Image (tube, rainbow, N blue to C red):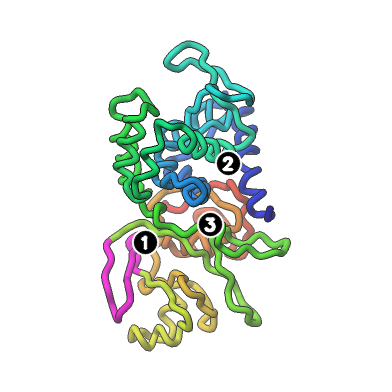
Amino acid sequence: MSFVKCFRRILPAALSVLSAFSAGASDAVKLTRTEYISLYKDDAIREMYRSGVPASITLAQACLESSDGNSPLAKVANNHFGIKCSNWDGPGYYQDDDKPNECFRKYNSVFESFDDHSNFLKTRPRYSFLFELNRTDYKGWAHGLKKAGYATDPTYANRLIKIIEEHNLHVYDLAENPENRPIASTNTIVPVEARPLPPVENTVREQRVFVPSVEPVDMFSNRRIERNNGVEFIRARKGDTFESLSRELSYGYWQLPKYNELPENTPLFEGQIIYIKPKKRDADTRFYVVKPGDTVHSVSQELGMKTRFLCKYNELEESASLAPGTRLQVAE
């Protein structure tokens, strides 16, 4: 197992232990829904490719069942889906639910909870019909879960759909498998979602590939224009350079490197996000939780915000290392 994967699996468990010690503190910081989704979206996507459960459904259920990772069941037992102890030989966590002092499954890590959730749905006959649905049919899955008895709340399906649509979780149902993304075999932590740059001398930095928020799409110069944080971008194609893109789009040679805060001679890789308008001062959320492999620049690219303001808000140098789990202010 790579260092990055191992770290991603150990980190949530460590955070859960710390949370348990500080649960009584009045000033304990709670995860926002946006932060929770950002932290666990890759696990949901990975489970989708392993089991067939749509990532949007997994994330929406996790948000709802765990109160965005803030419930005692999630913090102490790493149980993010409210699965009880029926047919379970592992440790339990007891709390009142439909009945007093009910037993819930307790896991060693959040990853185990995500894994068991997929297995729970995959191996129970009453959920088998769901796997005949298209994985992009999140509404069918939501109503099917309610029909199969996953929850007693009569509004359960609509609550899942609301979370999915408010946070554009359905885009993750079309995301690539994180397991297929190359990870460097060195002692250096690289972005989990990175694709390696072509081998050249003096390569300055890598740029992460991410799934942006869904916003209206246009076409320009035979290029698909998408928007993240309201900022237009295109994806680099094989053989693209800043120089060739500048000619194609009739931009000044300096504009694209400036908008993306990269040197003019930075090699571009296929699928790389290239902003064609200046990034914004602020992200569209107030806080961001650092993931393994994040850099100041990769975070600014992912959020569509300028690096200097990210540094200003958090009193950072652009070259600063970011510790996973750190909460960054990304809007004033």
Of residues 303 and 62, which is closer to you in this image? Answer: 62
Q: Which residues are magenta?
A: 216-232
Point out the frontmost of discs 1 and 3: 3
Give the distance between the C-alpha atoms of the residues marked 1 and 3, in whole angstroms: 21 Å
Of residues 234 and 286, which is closer to you in this image? Answer: 234
Point out the frontmost of discs 1 and 2: 2
Of residues 120 and 329, which is closer to you in this image? Answer: 120
Q: Secondary structure at mark 1?
A: strand
Quadrant for residue 237, please give it.
Answer: bottom left
**Residue carrying label 1:** 228
Q: Position of residue 201 (x, y in %)?
A: 65, 82
**Residue carrying label 3:** 178
Give the distance between the C-alpha atoms of the residues marked 1 and 2, in whole angstroms: 28 Å
Q: Amino acid at mark 2?
A: Phe
Q: Is residue 30 visible?
A: no
Q: Is residue 60 visible?
A: yes
In the rendered structure, find residue 70 and report the number of the disc placed on it. none
Q: Position of residue 65 (x, y in %)?
A: 44, 31
Q: Which residue sits at x=33%, y=30%? A: 146
Q: Position of residue 68 (x, y in %)?
A: 45, 36
Q: Which residue sits at x=45%, y=76%? A: 258
**Residue carrying label 2:** 111
First reached walking from the N terminus: tag 1 or tag 3 = 3
